Image (spheres, rainbow, N blue to C red):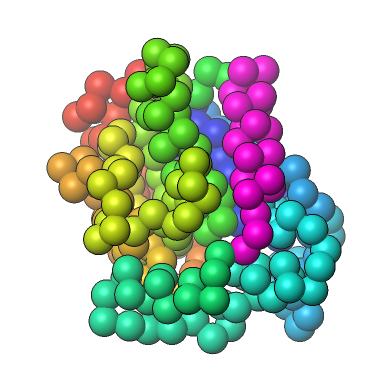
Amino acid sequence: MRFLCLPGAYGSSDKFQVQLAPFVKELTEDGTATFHFIHGPCKAVPPEGFEEYFGKPPYFRFIEPDNDLEKSKEDDILARIRDFPQCETPEDTMRELMREGIATTHRSTNNALKYLLKIMQERGPFDGIIGYSEGATVAATLLLHEQRRFRKKGIKPMFKYAIFFAGWPPVDPDSHKIILSDESDAMIEIPTCHIIGSLDPYVHGSLALYNVCDPDTAYMFDHAKGHTLPRDKDTVKELGDVVREAIKTYGIHS
């Protein structure tokens, strides 16, 4: 099985490969999977005070405000998560976070999709997709785009399985509004694995993403930590077994 891997905001392909190394080792040693790492097309600068958190440059993102106006910077969702709300439901939390409007990212989102479709064409095929944080949101958005393209143009989707680490809900590829399960019938139809951390301050984002996936084939895995990637041996082995079982159950093969 071949995975396309998308890092979080301000990450890079090299950094994500290091972050995901234990998981990669678990699934490559027995020949279960191979991994192709990329990063977003937008060069980025971390928020003030977060430079050390994201390591050394260069930094990349998949989605950014469409222009450099101060209003767009204020609208950028990543500039507002320092005061992440905690409401009664994941959907209410996301609505509260978005109450001042989503970032003006229409052109940037379209460019991210075009960028990923080009990579799929040139470096694919891929069987599965992995996304962490912003990369998970973009991966979910891409999956919805594939589904709609299939219905409109008959182009068969490439991805058969998705793994989301600490993700947030997708953006509607047409309206560019965030998709929430209590507002939309849109659903990611392929099998998905959602790795969440119950101590993640943004865990409601992960739950809102889980809620827009097919409940019959969506699997939730809690590593009981924060907004991080699991690295300890026992947790990684357990997660590897979950992926192997999914490949077997759903007949996912290259």
Apparent side of residue 189 relative to residue 95 in the rendered image (left or right):
left
Image-quadrant location for residue 77? bottom right
Q: Residue at x 54, y 69 (%)?
A: 101
Q: Judge left or right: residue 115 versus residue 94.
A: right
In the image, 51 versus 24, the foreground residue is 51
Determine whether 70 is above or below 140 in the image. Answer: below
Residue at screen point 74% across, 55% down: 66
Q: Quadrant of residue 154?
A: top left
| Relative vertical location of residue 245 with respect to residue 90 in this rendering, above or below | above
Marks counted in the figure total 0
* Residue 241, position as x, y percentages in the image: 29, 43
- Asked whether 111 falls inside the magenta stretch, the response is yes
| Dominant SS type (magenta) | helix
Comparing 200 with 202, the one in front is 202
Residue 32 in the image: state x and y as whole percent: 40, 28
Vertical placement of residue 22 versus 180, above or below:
above
Q: Residue visible at 45% across and 51% down?
A: 170
On-image quarter of the N terminus: top left
Q: Percent from the top left, x then y, of residue 86?
A: 37, 84
Q: Quadrant of the C terminus?
A: top left
Res 59 visible = no
- Locate residue 246, reporting x and y percent: 26, 35
Relative to 39, is 230 on the left or the right?
left
Give the residue drawn at x 32%, y 64%.
207
Q: In the orientation shown, which residue stands out farthest toward the top?
A: 154
Asked if residue 232 shows in the view, the reply is yes
Region of the chain picked out in magenta, as a range = 103-123
